Amino acid sequence: MTNNDHMKRTTLVLGGTGKTGRRVVERLTARGLSPRAGSRSGEPPFDWEDQATWAPVLKDVDAVYLSYQPDLAFPGAVATVRSFTALAVESGVRRLVLLSGRGEEEALACERTVRGSGAEWTILRSSWFCQNFSEDYLLEPVLGGVVAFPAGDVAEPFIDVEDIADVAVAALTEDGHAGQLYELTGPRLLTFADAAGEIAKASGREVEYVPVSFEQYAAALAEHGVPAEYATPLLDLFARVLDGRNAYLTDGVRRALGREPRDFTDYARDAAATGVWGGR
């Protein structure tokens, strides 16, 4: 693909305001491209639950970063991704980059859909995001000093979403990534207690990890007003992927980018510098 081809292409970034999608949009824009952010607040708007919004955002698009919300493991995701992928290819999309999850059976089904779509494909099978502690549901517990979570002492190779975004942009804009499955992990395994310790050290805050049962966590979600239709599949997902099945490292970042992935210490240092966890 030539540079002129790059300048002509329109890339749709689904979840364009989310943790990975926002960074993908920023990187594509920095390369002089004009990505289209697919979100409910986008123009035109995109909503996974409203198929009438799909065709407008796919107009003149030839590459898609496919990030499904809330998660590929949620009920209905497989059928929805299958329908969207078929429409995308029918609309002229030539390249699909799917953000997938490790150890999720439903995610594997979505991967098979993308692989069989007829378009060029790249799969990014990702570990637990570092940024869940600073941009998502674990931020409030960190600020409160107690991360109560049903992960026991399971180790996880936390991945920095900056690395995911770098791999995604490479797959969307460069040759050599079609037909590749990149399983993306950080460079080392950490328990959630280890992660809390890293955050405490970087932020100067007291942050403690407290393992709780799934029943206790379910009660906490209900107390915070999280609807059962969201909480139940979320807890089911946690129960499956936090059983140790993902407690190993892979070389996906190195294969895709030719460098090592960012360490959790680097993430914690940079996140602390933004002030998201407060000052020392």
Image (cartoon, rainbow, N blue to C red):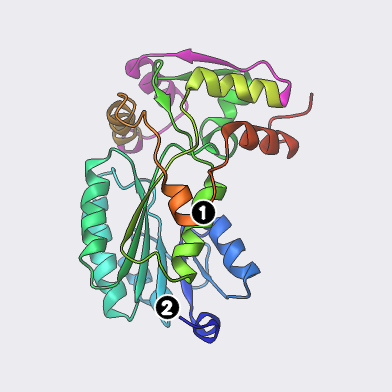
Q: Nearer the viewer, mark 1 or mark 2?
A: 1
Q: What residue sits 48% from the left and 22% below the top? A: 192
Instruction: Say left or right for 48 vs 280.
Output: left
Residue 168 point in image, percent of width and height:
47, 59
- Does residue 85 appear in the picture of this structure? yes
Q: Quadrant of the N terminus?
A: bottom left
Residue 218's tag is: none
The number of discs equals 2
Residue 61's tag is: 2
Q: Is residue 15 above or below residue 251?
A: below
Q: Which of 31/215 is in front?
A: 31
Residue 82 point in image, percent of width and height:
23, 62
Instruction: Say left or right for 265 vs 125.
Output: right
Binning the other alpha carbons within 10 Å of mark 2 as few (below 14), some (14 to 19) or many (20 upward) gives many
Residue 221 point in image, percent of width and height:
42, 26
SS class, disc 1: loop
**Which region of the structure is painted magenta?**
203-230
Image quadrant of residue 142?
top right
Residue carrying label 1? 258
Q: Is residue 18 above or below residue 242?
A: below
Q: Which of 251/279 is in front?
A: 251
Binning the other alpha carbons within 10 Å of mark 1 as few (below 14), some (14 to 19) or many (20 upward) gives few
Type of residue at label 2? Val
Q: CA distance from mark 1 to mark 2?
A: 28 Å
Instruction: Say left or right for 268 vs 130.
Output: right
Image quadrant of residue 177?
bottom left
